[in-house]
């Protein structure tokens, strides 16, 4: 239930969690909530220097710009852990601004002067500047002298604006939109009541401010800022959901699963948290892949839609599981619930319709697992064997797949291939690559393992071959199900008229048994014999 998967990421998550527990314990978070400045001085004087010393403010930035040279997946791991600890202040807005500026530098045309932007990124990474990013409309831009833009209007709410020295804001130019970098001293900030008591928000007003060309992020691709924001907000949502699940999982020193009344609620919380981690990780990973198709936007939108709703759900359910104490001001549950609700407000409901639009347009994400080097020799052998099957006539492929154990590779030979988990993953990938689709077993997927383990040799030989080939029903099995004798026509109504005529070893008619069980649930009619309970089979 964490974004970290590899040993390096797990070590990073553990390091960030340890720092957060030491530098931002619960009493410190409460002091930020109760402070008149909403923790602005605490963040500026204590937390920001600590984050910079840990290298977290520049974790995702290139080393040439003062960063650690990692990427967005590593930043997502850190954001999740800091959200799990509910670290107050401007970490997320600052690292989002750094990512935007770094992408603007990369996207700038050859020969363009990016020295001012590079200087800003270095200061953000060093912790000498704090930044915020506005995501809402409201500002307009007009051409100025020397490539400058004149910005005017009001936008907001902007998370972390009252903590920021630098603001990255969108400004409309007709149908187009351009992002600009403004100093906080050039704008007017109006503090607003924040749902999230650990992170202040403000409305930003700009009155005819000229932004020089060096601070106009004209080369940023459309949708990049909102995609980055959705990805990082989803990572934070994972941290909130994880805290809620952990908090609800144990009470009074006992695992909550021991209590029947709430264990199913906790199970659904865990499921939602795992789904959130899956989509958030995929969104972060998408930023390491070459840009081009709509897959990156699709992943970011899915993360914003699924992960943030999961955080809201888990935080809400955590309060329910906690009972009376969950509703009190003294418990931290409401602070996490507030953070989740604020993330939902920032992400905007537009992402759900955007994901639907992209999906209808054919956008998708590849499903694959990063496998170790040991998979290479396995893959070579699997690829060669499957290529021979793919070259066979279409009508023969199902038989060849079944004969080779490819349909149920995890089972022992001759019905499977005794494949290890690694081999199973390789086989699944190579089947897709070869364009081969194993027969669907349907409910046979339940039957096959039981027959392999417990069936007699005669039963295995009679049924397993047909099942792994995906045969619907062989005549003998169909007649047995419908109660037909050899030679009788397989009339489709036979099954309905006769019911199941399967016979247990002791000679009990299971079909009649099922009818008698059904009679017990029907109202008794006058003149009709009441069903006898002593006719029922022993349990």
Image (cartoon, helix red, strand yellow):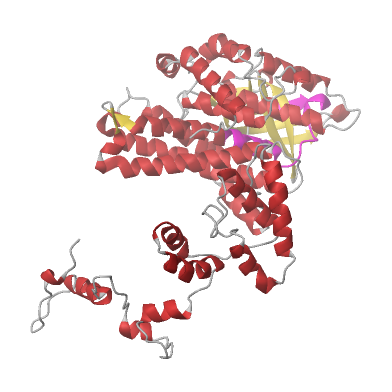
Between 87 and 223, the one lying in front of the other is: 87
Location of residue 272 by image quarter: top left
Residue 268 vertical placement versus 507 (above, below):
above
Q: Position of residue 160 (x, y in %)?
A: 57, 24
The residue at the far front in this view is: 457
Q: Indicate the quadrant where residue 519 lies.
A: bottom left
Instruction: Tell me the residue at 58%/22% (across/down).
Output: 12
Q: Which of 500 and 338 is in front in this view?
A: 500
Q: Name, please, the residue furthest toward the left.
A: 527
Residue drawn 56% across and 54% down?
409
Q: Is residue 536 left or right of residue 442?
A: left
Image label count: 0
What is the quadrant of residue 233 in the picture? top right
Inspect the magenta stretch and tell me whether residue 106 lies in it.
no
Q: Residue at the far right: name it.
A: 111
The magenta span reads 208-233
- Res. 160 visible in picture: no
Q: Position of residue 188 (x, y in %)?
A: 62, 23
Nearer to the camera, 278 or 50: 278
Q: Is residue 223 left or right of residue 337?
A: right
Q: Position of residue 80 (x, y in %)?
A: 53, 29
Tell me the quarter of the image containing the C terminus. bottom left
Residue 209 included in the magenta stretch of the image: yes
519 lies left or right of 411: left
Where residue 68 appears, as percent x and y from the top left, is 70, 19
């Amino acid at each position: 239930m964490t974004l970290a998967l590899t040993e390096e990421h797990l070590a990073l998550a553990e390091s960030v969690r340890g720092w957060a527990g030491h530098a931002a314990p619960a009493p410190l978070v409460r002091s930020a909530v109760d402070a008149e400045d909403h923790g602005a001085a605490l963040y500026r004087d204590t937390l920001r220097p600590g984050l910079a010393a840990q290298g977290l403010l520049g974790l995702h930035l290139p080393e040439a710009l003062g960063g650690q040279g990692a990427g967005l997946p590593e930043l997502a791991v850190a954001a999740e852990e800091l959200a799990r600890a509910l670290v107050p202040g401007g970490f997320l807005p600052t690292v989002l601004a750094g990512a935007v500026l770094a992408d603007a530098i990369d996207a700038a045309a050859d020969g363009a002067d990016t020295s001012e932007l590079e200087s800003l990124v270095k200061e953000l990474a060093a912790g000498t500047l704090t930044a915020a990013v506005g995501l809402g409309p409201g500002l307009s831009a007009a051409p100025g002298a020397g490539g400058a833009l004149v910005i005017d209007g009001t936008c907001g709410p902007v998370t972390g604006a009252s903590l920021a020295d630098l603001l990255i804001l969108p400004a409309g130019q007709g149908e187009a939109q351009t992002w600009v970098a403004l100093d906080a001293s050039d704008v007017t900030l109006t503090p607003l009541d924040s749902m999230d008591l650990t992170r202040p928000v403000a409305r930003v007003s700009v009155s005819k401010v000229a932004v020089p060309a060096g601070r106009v992020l004209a080369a940023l691709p459309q949708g990049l800022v909102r995609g980055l924001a959705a990805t990082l907000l989803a990572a934070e949502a994972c941290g909130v959901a994880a805290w809620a699940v952990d908090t609800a999982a144990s009470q009074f020193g006992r695992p909550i699963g021991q209590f029947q009344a709430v264990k199913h609620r906790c199970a659904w919380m865990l499921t939602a948290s795992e789904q959130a981690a899956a989509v958030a990780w995929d969104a972060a990973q998408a930023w390491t892949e070459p840009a081009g198709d709509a897959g990156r936007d699709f992943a970011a939108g899915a993360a914003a839609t699924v992960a943030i709703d999961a955080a809201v759900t888990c935080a809400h359910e955590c309060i329910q599981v906690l009972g009376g104490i969950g509703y009190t001001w003294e418990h931290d549950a409401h602070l996490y619930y507030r953070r989740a609700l604020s993330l939902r407000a920032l992400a905007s409901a537009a992402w759900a319709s955007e994901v639907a639009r992209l999906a209808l347009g054919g956008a998708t994400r590849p499903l694959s697992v990063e496998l170790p080097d040991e998979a290479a020799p396995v893959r070579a052998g699997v690829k060669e064997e499957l290529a021979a099957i793919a070259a066979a006539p279409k009508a023969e492929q199902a038989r060849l797949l079944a004969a080779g154990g490819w349909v149920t590779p995890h089972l022992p030979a001759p019905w499977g291939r005794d494949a290890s988990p690694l081999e199973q993953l390789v086989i699944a990938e190579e089947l897709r690559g070869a364009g081969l689709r194993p027969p669907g077993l349907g409910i046979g997927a339940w039957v096959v393992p039981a027959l392999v383990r417990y069936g007699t040799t005669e039963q295995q030989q009679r049924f397993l071959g047909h099942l792994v080939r995906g045969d619907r029903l062989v005549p003998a099995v169909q007649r047995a199900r419908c109660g037909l004798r050899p030679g009788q026509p397989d009339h489709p109504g036979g099954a309905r008229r006769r019911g199941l005529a399967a016979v247990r070893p002791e000679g009990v008619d299971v079909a009649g048994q099922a009818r008698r069980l059904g009679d017990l649930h029907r109202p008794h009619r006058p003149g009709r014999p009441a069903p006898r309970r002593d006719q029922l089979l022993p349990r």
